[in-house]
Amino acid sequence: MIYYEEDSKTLKYVITNNTSMTSAFYHALPSYDSGGPMSNFYQTYIFSEKLDTDKLKKDEKK
């Protein structure tokens, strides 16, 4: 998901990923979705990027 934060003129990216234990360890281990050991990995990456609105306006004129 990408969010625009108007007050700070930034884009906020939220990327989620879930990976099985089998996939994470190149099929060397089995996977279980029990929520305990040997279950899936759930990851969330969040980062922001400042927008240069002046550059965007210049690109619109082309």
Image (cartoon, grey):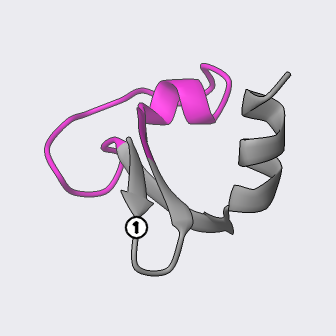
Q: Secondary structure at mark 1?
A: strand
Q: Position of residue 52 (x, y in %)?
A: 75, 62
Left or right position of 38 against 33: right
Could you tell whether 57 is left or right of 16 in the image? right
Residue ID at (32%, 56%): 37
- The residue drawn where x is 54% and y is 70% is 9
* Magenta-drawn segment: 15-40
Q: Between 52 and 4, which is closer to the camera in this rendering?
A: 52
Quick one: 61 or 55, which is closer to the camera?
61
Residue 7: quarter of image: bottom left
Which quarter of the image is occupied by the C terminus? top right
Query: Residue most toward the left?
Result: 34
Give the residue number, with chain letter if any, for mark 1: 5
- Along the line of sight, the residue nearer the viewer: 29 or 33: 33
Q: Is residue 6 visible?
A: yes
Residue 47, by quadrant, is bottom right
The location of residue 34, given as percent across then percent down, is 13, 44
Residue 39: percent from left, percent from top: 30, 44
User: What's the magenta bit mostly, secondary-structure-wise?
Assistant: loop
Q: Tell me: residue 18, above or below residue 15.
A: above
Q: Label 1 is placed on what type of residue? A: Glu
Extreme-front residue of the structure: 61
Residue at coordinates 38% horizontally, 41% vertically from top-left?
A: 1
Q: Farthest residue in the bottom direction?
A: 8
**Camera sees residue 52:** no
Q: Give the x, y percent position of residue 55.
A: 82, 51
Residue 23 in the magenta stretch? The answer is yes
In the image, residue 21 lies in the stretch drawn in magenta:
yes
Residue 61 to residue 56: above or below: above
> Is residue 36 or residue 56 the one in the foreground?
56
Above or below: residue 54 compared with residue 9? above
